[in-house]
Image: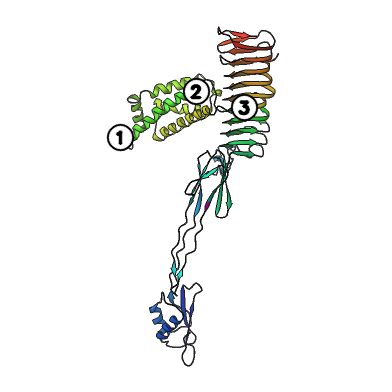
């Protein structure tokens, strides 16, 4: 503190953070010796950021208002590390504008991912720059926050500890433990209510257990196994694995995997078309990169059609063959994804204008259909188990088991065996395995049809007149009621009933 022989003339105050020092006069005066000011600064240990110009001004014109005469360098703060969540958040509910609401059933917010999908990524912090106090001391920058990842169930963390990946198909979720984030992926999602208009359609990558019913006009589409404890009424259930319904199924479509006559052949046909279209796409990219063709000037569709007539003559016959193939199949037997993909191939006939966006969409749809066929051919464990079925369409890549009263007016297509503990009245069974039915047909209504592959056997405990049984290409219509018999082809390729 500086003073003369009579009184204090000024006072220097240092800021609490030591980043500034200010001076003010203690009483009215016309002049203060600046050497005394510098001496007091030295006494206070203020050595950095001294403002000589401000000291000169204050010395000639002292003021009782504080004047900053020394200023340090504040530290530059860094940035905290942060985590980016990469898995989606699902639909955001019903649009504000009702006219934009295409389907009120597509309002589910359940998030699911496939195995090996990246779930999150952590970015490191950016450290700040140290500052300098007016005393010459180093002022540290605030330490930024560092996010740490920890692997929970169904998740792996990479070697750098910055990315998390799903090990299984399922529902990802994050447990927030402060700066530690525990990433999980549950392979089974438990839906503790009905699937109805309130919940929206249920779509999930993984396994699903539904404790309630699946209500009218709703859809459940799951890549893994599905277990439904309640009823299924006028709904559509698609499962990539096992499908179990403990209640009754009424006027609904059930599918476990992809199974229909000629599915394997269709897979090969899709493979051929996909290969040719990818080669065509590569040729188009090369023509563009080599400046042979400028698509901003030339019509994209005409270029493609020209290549189909010259270098890629196989594409149109392949498209015609697959369209003919699917045209001979009942539309109900073919998954809609396959039908849509084949329908898009019509853009190569020249009847519609073809552009680059349309071409890319065709590649995407054909590739998706091929992946669907391949994926389901690999998962032969698909099966369906229901209590009973009324007016239903049931498709399974594996077996079908009906454990209750049986089926009425229901069509069953199975890649494996079919077992019906009760009765099968009306409808048709198409099986590549064996068929075992307790009671076939009835005295009223349309007669049922049971068709199996040539090497399979049909076992019936009771069958009514009019029931039709076909093994391979051999068919017989029962002319009387029969008890406990089997039907199969003998060595001479003749249908035997014994």
Whole-number angstrom distance, CA of label 2 to CA of label 1 = 39 Å
Residue annotated with mark 1: 293
| Residue 474 % position (x, y) | 57, 10
Residue annotated with mark 3: 384
Which corner quadrant of the image does residue 450 belong to?
Answer: top right
Magenta region, mostly helix, strand or loop?
A: loop
Q: Is residue 343 magenta?
A: no
Query: Which secondary structure lies at badge 2?
Result: helix
Q: Farthest residue toward the bottom?
A: 6
Q: Closest to the observer: 226 or 178?
A: 178
Q: Is residue 17 above or below residue 187?
A: below
Query: Which secondary structure lies at badge 1?
Result: loop
Q: Residue at x 37, y 30 (%)?
A: 279
Query: Which secondary structure lies at badge 3?
Result: strand
| Residue 87 % position (x, y) | 52, 44
Q: Is residue 353 above or below residue 90?
A: above
Q: Nearer the viewer, mark 1 or mark 3?
A: 3
Give the mark, 1 or 3, whose residue is nearer the N terminus: 1
Q: Residue at x 45, y 88 (%)?
A: 29
| Residue 117 % position (x, y) | 50, 41
Give the mark, 2 or 3, whose residue is nearer the N terminus: 2
Q: Residues within 10 Å of mark 2 (few under 14, many from 20)?
A: some
Q: Closest to the observer: 184 or 74?
A: 184
Q: Is residue 297 visible?
A: no
Q: Residue at x 45, y 26 (%)?
A: 270
Whole-number angstrom distance, CA of label 1 to CA of label 3 = 53 Å
Residue annotated with mark 2: 264
Q: Which residues are magenta?
A: 144-148
65 left or right of 152? Answer: left
| Residue 407 % position (x, y) | 67, 22
Q: Residues within 10 Å of mark 1 (few under 14, many from 20)?
A: some
């Amino acid at each position: 503190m500086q003073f003369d022989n009579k009184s204090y003339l000024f006072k220097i105050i240092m800021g609490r953070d030591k980043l500034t020092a200010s001076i003010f006069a203690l009483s009215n005066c016309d002049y203060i010796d600046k050497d005394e000011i510098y001496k007091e600064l030295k006494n206070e240990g203020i050595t950095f950021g001294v403002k000589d110009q401000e000291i000169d001004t204050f010395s000639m014109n002292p003021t009782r208002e504080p004047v900053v005469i020394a200023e340090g360098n504040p530290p530059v703060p860094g940035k905290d590390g942060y985590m980016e969540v990469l898995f989606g958040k699902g639909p955001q509910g019903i649009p504000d504008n009702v006219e934009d609401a295409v389907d009120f059933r597509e309002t589910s917010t359940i998030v699911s991912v496939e195995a090996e999908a990246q779930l999150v990524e952590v970015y490191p912090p950016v450290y700040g720059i140290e500052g300098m106090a007016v005393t010459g001391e180093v002022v540290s920058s605030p330490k930024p926050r560092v996010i740490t990842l920890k692997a929970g169930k169904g998740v792996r963390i990479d070697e750098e500890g910055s990315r998390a990946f799903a090990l299984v198909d399922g529902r990802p979720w994050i447990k927030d433990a402060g700066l530690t984030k525990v990433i999980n992926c549950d392979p089974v999602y438990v839906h503790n209510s009905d699937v109805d208009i309130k919940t929206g359609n249920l779509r999930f990558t993984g396994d699903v257990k539904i404790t309630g019913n699946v209500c009218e006009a709703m859809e459940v589409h799951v890549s893994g196994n599905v277990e439904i404890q309640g009823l299924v009424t006028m709904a559509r259930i698609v499962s990539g694995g096992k499908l179990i319904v403990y209640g009754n199924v009424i006027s609904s479509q059930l599918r476990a995997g992809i199974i229909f006559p000629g599915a394997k052949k269709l897979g090969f046909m899709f493979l051929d078309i996909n290969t040719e279209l990818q080669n065509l796409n590569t040729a188009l990219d090369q023509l563009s990169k080599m400046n042979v063709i400028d698509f901003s000037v030339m019509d994209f569709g005409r270029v493609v059609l020209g290549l189909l007539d010259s270098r890629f003559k196989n594409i149109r016959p392949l498209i015609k063959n697959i369209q003919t193939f699917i045209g001979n199949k009942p539309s109900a037997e073919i998954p809609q994804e396959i039908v849509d993909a084949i329908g898009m191939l019509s853009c190569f006939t020249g009847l519609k204008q073809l552009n680059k966006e349309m071409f890319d969409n065709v590649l995407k749809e054909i590739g998706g259909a091929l992946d669907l066929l391949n994926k389901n051919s690999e998962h032969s464990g698909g099966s369906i188990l229901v209590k009973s079925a009324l007016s239903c369409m049931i498709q399974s890549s594996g077996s079908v088991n009906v454990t209750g009263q049986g089926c009425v007016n229901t069509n069953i297509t199975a890649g494996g065996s079919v077992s019906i503990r009760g009765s099968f009245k009306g409808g048709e069974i198409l099986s590549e395995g064996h068929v075992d039915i307790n009671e076939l047909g009835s005295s009223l209504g349309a007669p049922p049809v049971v068709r199996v592959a040539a090497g399979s056997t049909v076992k019936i405990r009771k069958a009514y007149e009019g029931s039709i049984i076909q093994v391979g290409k051999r068919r017989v219509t029962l002319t009387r009621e029969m008890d406990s018999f089997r039907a199969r082809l003998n060595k001479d390729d003749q249908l035997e009933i014994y």
